[in-house]
């Protein structure tokens, strides 16, 4: 059995560390796009403070081998907002409008001039350009050049204004060896399907920056895995505050890892409890028996034929084709809300009595195909239920209850009535709900099955059955 140190060296050398060609190509494409941005910025008479390659391929240098992402940030002076709107921190709608103009007339045109294709304007909190250059995905993002002191006191103008400070912190505080350990940690999260805002396990997984700050606190790969298992009992705060103070400030967050550039931001707020639970399970396995496969990303598995044959009939798989044009996180969030409401509908009768019992779902998406796997505790139930009525001493309520339920009987001081259910088969209830409640006319429901028809549906089933349900706490 290999020890973790031996596995680390093997995986870094053979699978993880970027090649010289990776680094040189990224730099070459970045410079081409930077020149195009500078050209159109001059035409618009917009002075840029910087045009910088951010993300893991920038100054942080924590990218993985064959990474094909270029996050190019265009820094603006806050003075531009003061001159145009008379305020250093105008309303978000005003900032969106201002940046939208720059995105259309500088970033979009720069992507065209640089030879990109599949160019689109995408909206997260603010608009930005997404494009493809050769085999690289390119994001062109505007931000404001703000001092840390300003962000701490007033907050950022856009969500990405902190990014350049994040890069600076990582480049100044992590050694070359620690950056390699960050690469391994990110590869571990990716191979375990618990990475980023496309995480198949949970609504969102560990981010690259959370991996970098976890490494800053724990100092090496093994200690990072151990520390991760202790979260949320251990809070990681660069500013040294007490647990009670942080829990009071971030009381709704499951994990707390404080952004070292902003004491008022929990960078782990988006990390799902499910993603953390499954990551901890994988970390325990890795530490007990180190092996390279924990760092090598593959496709989400599907159940074997024998496993599928023996599958209990508690599952349903629903798939959608997304033609909304929304950012994928918006579709993800809409479906999470929708299926949370569906699970509430399935779990209990309208009057509160148990219906099909506990319902759990998970969502997987690839490109514009979204699959939701649903597990229902009792998919078949008897056609009637015992409806609980009012206590016997409430004369008026009892009278009204008996008018509706002449068969009611008194039991343990309350009236009860055997009542016909609207649904006794969970599949019928799901189909009814899907027909009556439409998320979007452009989010097309393509299939509902018990085991999944498309591969992505079968993958969603595997995730729910093997990576979510066994680790719910």
Image: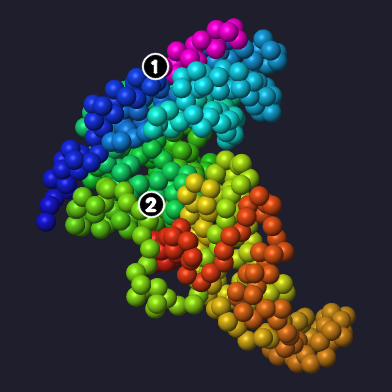
Which numbered tag is attached to residue 322? none
Quadrant for residue 64, please give it.
top left
Q: Which residue is mark 1?
A: 31
x%, y% of residue 82? 66, 12
In this picture, residue 79 sits left or right of residue 178? right
Could you tell me residue 178's position as x and y percent? 25, 33
Residue 71 to residue 253: above or below: above
Q: CA distance from mark 1 to mark 2?
A: 33 Å
Mark 1 nearby-residue class (10 Å; few <14, some 14–19, many ≥20): some
Label 2, residues with CA under 10 Å away: few <14, some 14-19, many ≥20: many
Is 33 within the magenta?
yes
Q: Position of residue 131 (x, y in %)?
A: 49, 30
Of the numbered discs 1 and 2, the one sitting upstream in the chain is 1
* Relative to 342, residue 45 above or below: above
Q: Quadrant of residue 144?
A: top right
In this picture, which residue range is highlighted in magenta?
32-45
Q: Which residue bears the numbered disc 2?
A: 193
Would residue 289 be seen by someone viewing this image from the given angle?
yes
Q: Residue at x 58, y 30 (%)?
A: 121
Left/right placement of residue 134 relative to residue 348 reads: left
């Amino acid at each position: 059995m290999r020890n973790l140190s031996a596995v680390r060296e093997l995986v870094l050398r053979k699978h993880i560390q970027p090649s010289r060609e990776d680094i040189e190509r990224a730099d070459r494409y970045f410079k081409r796009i930077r020149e195009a941005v500078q050209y159109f910025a001059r035409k618009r008479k917009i002075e840029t403070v910087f045009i910088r390659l951010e993300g893991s391929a920038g100054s942080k240098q924590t990218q993985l081998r064959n990474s094909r992402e270029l996050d190019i940030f265009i820094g603006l002076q806050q003075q531009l907002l003061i001159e145009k709107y008379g305020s250093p921190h105008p309303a978000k709608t005003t900032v969106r409008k201002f940046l939208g103009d720059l995105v259309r007339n500088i970033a979009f045109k720069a992507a065209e001039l640089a030879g990109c294709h599949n160019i689109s304007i995408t909206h997260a909190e603010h608009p930005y350009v997404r494009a493809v250059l050769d085999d690289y995905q390119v994001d062109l993002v505007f931000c404001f050049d703000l001092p840390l002191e300003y962000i701490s006191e007033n907050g950022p103008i856009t969500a990405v204004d902190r990014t350049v400070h994040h890069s600076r912190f990582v480049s100044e505080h992590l050694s070359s060896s620690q950056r390699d350990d960050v690469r391994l940690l990110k590869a571990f999260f990716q191979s375990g399907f618990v990475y980023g805002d496309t995480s198949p396990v949970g609504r969102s997984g560990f981010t690259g920056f959370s991996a970098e700050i976890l490494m800053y606190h724990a100092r090496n790969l093994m200690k990072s895995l151990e520390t991760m298992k202790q979260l949320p009992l251990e809070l990681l705060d660069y500013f040294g505050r007490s647990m009670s103070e942080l829990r009071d400030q971030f009381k709704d967050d499951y994990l707390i890892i404080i952004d070292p550039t902003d004491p008022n931001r929990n960078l782990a707020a988006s990390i799902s409890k499910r993603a953390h639970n499954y990551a901890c399970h994988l970390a325990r396995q890795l530490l007990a028996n180190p092996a390279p496969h924990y760092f090598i990303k593959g496709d989400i598995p599907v159940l074997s034929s024998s496993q599928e044959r023996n599958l209990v009939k508690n599952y349903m798989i629903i798939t959608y084709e997304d033609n909304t044009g929304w950012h994928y996180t918006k579709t993800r969030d809409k479906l999470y809300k929708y299926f949370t409401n569906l699970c509430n509908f399935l779990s209990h009768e309208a009057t509160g009595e148990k219906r099909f019992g506990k319902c759990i779902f998970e969502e997987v998406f690839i490109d514009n195909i979204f699959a939701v796997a649903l597990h229902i505790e009792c998919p078949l139930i008897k056609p009637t239920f015992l409806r609980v009525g009012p206590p016997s001493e409430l004369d008026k309520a009892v009278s009204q209850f008996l008018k509706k339920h002449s068969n009611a009987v008194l039991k343990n001081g309350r009236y009860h009535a055997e009542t016909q259910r609207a649904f006794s088969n969970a599949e019928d209830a799901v189909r009814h709900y899907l027909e009556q409640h439409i998320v979007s006319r452009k989010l097309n429901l393509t299939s509902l099955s018990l085991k999944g028809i498309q591969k992505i549906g079968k993958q969603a089933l595997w995730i729910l059955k093997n990576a979510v349900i066994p680790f719910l706490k």
